[in-house]
Image: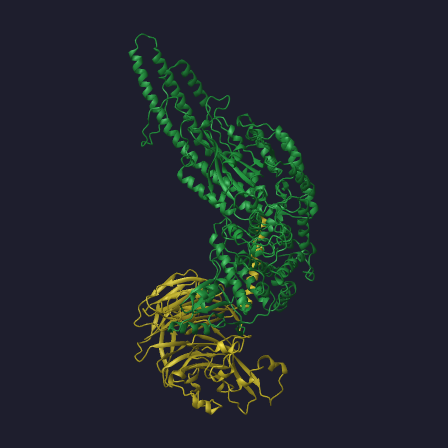
Chain colours: A green, B yellow
Amino acid sequence: MISAPDVVAFTKEDEYEEEAYSNSEPALPEEYSVPLFPFASQGANPWSKLSGAKFTRDFILISEFSEQVGPQPLLTIPDDAKVSGTFDLNYFSLRIMSVDYQASFVGHPPGCPYPKLNFVEDSKVVLGDSKEGAFAYVHHLTLYDLEARGFVRPFCMAYISADEHKIMQMFQELSAEFSKASECLKTGNRKAFANELEKKLKDLDYTRTVLHSETEIQKKNNEKGYYTTQAIEKANELASVEKSIIEHQDLLKQIRSYPYSKLKDSDFHPYEPESANEPADEESEQQEFTTSKPDEPREPHLYSRRSSYTPKLIKAKSAKCFDKKLKTLQELCDVYFFTQTLDQLHQIEKTFRGDVCYLLTHQISRALLKQQSITNFLFEEVFPLDEREPERQLNGYQGVHPDNPGEKSLDVCPLPKPLIGSYKSSVESVPIKMDPETEDPQETEVDDTVACDNQDNVEYLDADLKGSISSGESIEVLGTEKSALAQAENQVQLPQANASPQLARDKAVSRRTISEDSIEVLSTCPSEALIPEDFKASYPSAINEETYADEEEEGLHFDPEEMEGNLELGNQLPVDSACCIGKESPNFLEPANNVALKHCGDDDGVVSIPPQPFRQGDLGFQVNFTDCSSHDGVLGSLLSYELDPHYLSSHREISKMSLDKCSDSTSYISSTASTSSDRTPSPSPLCSGGSHSGERQKKKAGQNALRFIRQYPFAHPAIYSLLSGRTLVVLGEEKAIVEKLVTALSIFVPNCGSYAKPVKHWAVSTLNITDFQKWKLIGMQRSSSPAGVSMMHSLIRYGRYISILDADSKTLRCPQYRGTLIPRLADHRTQIKRGSTYFMHVQTLLTQLSAKAFLFAFCHHLHLPLKEGETEASMASRRLNFLKMHLGLANEDSKVVQYLAELLKLQFVQDPVRGVSPVLRFDYVPSALYKI
Amino acid sequence: MLRWLIGGGREPQGLVEKSVQPIGEEQTQNPYTELLVLKGHHDIVRFLVAIDDYRFASAGDDGIVCLWNAQTGEKLFELHAHAQKITALASFPLSDTCEEKCHMILTAGADRTVIIWDCDSGRQIHKVSCFHSTVKCLTVLHRLDVWLSGGSDLCVWNRKLDLLCKTSHLIDADITSMIELPKNCVAAAVGKELIIFRLKTSRDGTEWDVFEVKRLIDHQDSIVSLVSVSEVMFATGSHVGELIVWDSLDWTMQAYECNWDTSLHADPQQEIKLSHSQSEVSVQHLASDEECVFAAVGKGIYVYNLQMKRVIAFQKTAHDSTVLHITTVPNSRQLISCSEDGSVRIWELREKQHLTAEPVPSGFFSIWGFGRTNKQASHLAKKAPESTTVFSLDLIGDLIGHSSAVQMFLYFTEHGLATCSADNFIILWKDGERESRLRSLMLFHKLEQSEDLQLRS
């Protein structure tokens, strides 16, 4: 865990606690109370962004633009009336549906005799409603319904939050997640639609047979050579049925062709005529119709497979009745897919719960963790990161790709794009082109590639203004975005500390012009490249260059290739380089050290750094980290002990600056910070991997650990035992007490491999040497039975391999510890009060420790002779010197790093097939007995 | 038992009287700081044999033979063929004359079979099951390229498992151990007797004969241990504590020592307290270097100097229980012993010039004598007034890992120590520093490789 509580004021809670806060708020006399956050109506914490809104927490809304009753909300996730509160769902449905340009879709495109299904991409829009205090990511999609107008039913899923910033920051993730959910829905829908079509075709086929026979009968009866009106009617009817059959067959073919066209080009799904003979068919069909020759032999498609369905006679003009009840969403999609989608949406809701700051931190720390592929296994739980879009993770981290500034948003500013000033005027002039066939596909493709090359995500929208016109309000389109998959790879969703002040000012200005109840369309994603050439060419590139230049000025030099390459395994440290610590290494090690010292040494609890600008610091870390491979440093000047002046101050300054620039009162980052991080209301966990219970466990472990370090004065040697790989046996009569201690201490146990932690919570049998090889923390039952005696005996026998913590008599027998590391890790006077905060604190220090271990293990010159015939003793002294002088580790601390380095080595050189051979390393050191 | 609770770090001084002097947890001279537990057997592991300088085989009561890599601890093969427990294990050294260039091991089981295994492939090469009794010992005569099996008779086999010749049935007892002597002779321990056999072969090597040359009946009780000391000497030890050194050429007795208790003690009071039972003086195992024979007698270890013809140093109760196996560490004056008490101990034979003799460099004392001189004084061998050199056998480390009797161990110069035990485990004890260095080298080697790969691609 890289994210530090020192940096993030938010640690998250398992349950949302708004109510708790509002209730437990001590009633201060009026005169003492400080004027709080202006919008604070309930609860007085400045972090609560929800206070202005009429709902208590983020939720997902699914609504439909019903052709019968207009926009209507269908369901919310979580399905709880409390969540939406007094929020007017109907009103908001109207809002979000009103921006759906696809509502104007027509079934019969001009110039085509048959209705065409339009495989439109979903559109993604961000809009805000300042009156309701709600901001939403809106995902429009259309589902097919044979009975609906134009065969389509427009739906939308909206993620509604009171935090505009969150929506903007999380846009990529929201978009990706909702696209998945939408794809699921649509898949089910296609299936259901195909079924429906098949049934309808059978009906039609049956009807035609009936009509045909009737006509034949009439023909026979009619000897006179002229047609009665009845006969003509019948013939017409038959003809229309025939036409209907062809239409439906065509539709079926289209719906079935979907996956193939999807494969061909994932971006672009216009209807393409499937075969050349179809127009000919149509021709003959036309002739048939005009000449009224119904007995023309046609080959009907047979759907005899589904014999369970008995076709029924249908009236030719039965379709599209308005008195019909429309299908529900469940009916439209297969039930299986529907529940699947709901599950996904629930997961989304869970994932995005909580403050944006937490989400971002989590995201970044995960991205960073991914980079540390070598040291990760030591203290990180195995996270299911890899299943979740590896390329997105990469982006998550490499948000600072210099070519890619289009998506970068201002650090503290809630608005995403630096294009407001110039943009508005262009909106109206964009024509809405819904018909894909009028487009030149060739052109579109070229545009796509151009767009990708420029890393240019900003595309200009053809906004369908109908919705807003009808509501009598203005829409401001502030930014648009194309939602092609290819682009998602290049997009960046992380905040950027260094946007140009100019842009910030622009933004602030434009914001003031927004009227109270206007809808701001902040970003939309048209389905296709509907954008005129000139827009693409001119705007985004210009903007890109500007921000790019800004970035250069900020001095963030960052070579993504180098980073990508170097941080992977393998080529990390070229063996031929004499030393792997380059000139920049002071930046690398010492600042981190000092930061940790600063935070941990005195005030753990006080968080004074705004949560976001840490990016730069992290970046610096990474840059230097990678650079160290390319610099041939001189041994003598390995590291200097200076504090890098811009490590801390720089991002503080920047954040201050951006705070100043941003006049928005909703910028929640207060520089005063929370006085107690324990009280920050972070509503919910973000466990995208579904590791909800893991989160809870962490919290519990942290809580127990806090209690342990406060309660036991000998916590330091105990923790030292764990960190140096000496098995700690917790001995006690009561299982509950022992297990509590084991949970508390388990957060300090380094992993030996990428499996579960080597912790055994409760052992009742006699231990032998293999147990110490396997487990590093053992809870053990003390009993007076013969078995218990033999257990005690084995503990004495193996005393040299273990430390024994006696929970009953509160004694500890273990080697002495005289270092500086663990006091920082486990300060009994710590101000941290919350378990999860403490957990993060520990993780931060442990990550730092593993970085040191990594350095120690992978420094070439420490383990290989510098010149021919160098003695082993001189190398050993070089190692010791390195530990002491450069890593700043004294006494036992170096043992910890050595042990961790040994684990790293073992893991690194392990045979991929056979795995790590479990080695028990130990020292012959005397133990001491500690008592309370 | 709970002395750690009171005592804290150091072992309490009051326990010095306890026969084995404690070493405490601080063992600066003990190089073994890393261990690897090898699991593969389901019953007592009794035999270990080195195949080459990085592989070894283990066998025991479960009838399984395991081949291990001493470097990585990896199990190479698990050989199943014996239905009953294995009674003898020997390895065929790689011979230049043989056309098959492979390492082989021989195993003899209680099911009266002997099997030859190919160590490189794990295959069974040959199997013989025509024995009248269990084969209790196997000896490979490398020079003649034959091997001998000893049980109720002595059989001579060649590499292809052709029976070349055999002795008549031995009535009194079975052969329990054999060693090779010069001039194509073999000494076999049969009960109380030591029988010398001689092998005769025709010029073309097709006809073989083995016959008894001499029977030595000097031991009072059954011979437990038999070891070759040098080209010209070998030693035997018996159940009642007799140690006899023999001349290898004319099989005459060179030295005799049996009075372990009375003859040696400088402190008569202590002797009275410790009355040894019969079993406790059994010479369980013998080891030797050029100068001394090291005898595991009961719980104690005794160093018998061949030149001085007397015991020069000893630890009367080196272990808490019977010592089962001892070995000298090559190129050092160290000795390793293992015992039924489950521990392995490392000893050093220290030579101290008497103060009256020529001056000793001052640094010499401070290396090892510091702080322990008082304790060690009682363990010094009796000070011979005529000699100025005093020897002592000092404990420099112990290895605790097995939970039951350590049956045997195998010393590898490169890869540390393998111990096998009745708790079914084999433990590889390694020098942690060395292993760490090796891993670092492997790591950089791997980095280099992946770099090469990247450069190439």
- Which of A507/A251 is in front? A507
Residue A214 percent coordinates (x, y): 31, 17
The answer to which of B100 and B420 lies nearer the viewer is B420
Q: Farthest residue toward the top?
A: A224
Q: Is residue A718 above or below residue A485?
A: below
Measuring from the top left, give residue B71's x and y in whole percent: 49, 64
Report if residue B96 is visible in the image. Answer: no
Q: Which residue is at a point 66% across and 47% down the rendered structure image? A: A659
Q: Is residue A679 above or below residue A467?
A: below
Labels in figure, total: 0
Q: Nearer the viewer, residue B445 or A890?
A: A890
Residue B89's quadrant in the figure? bottom left
Tell me, yes or no, if residue A241 can be seen here: yes
**Rendered location of residue B450, percent (x, y):** 56, 53
- Quarter of the rendering containing residue B201: bottom left
Vertically, is A712 above or below B292?
Answer: above
Residue A523 in percent (x, y) is at 58, 37
B192 above or below B103?
below
Classify the position of the N terminus of chain A by image quarter.
Answer: bottom right
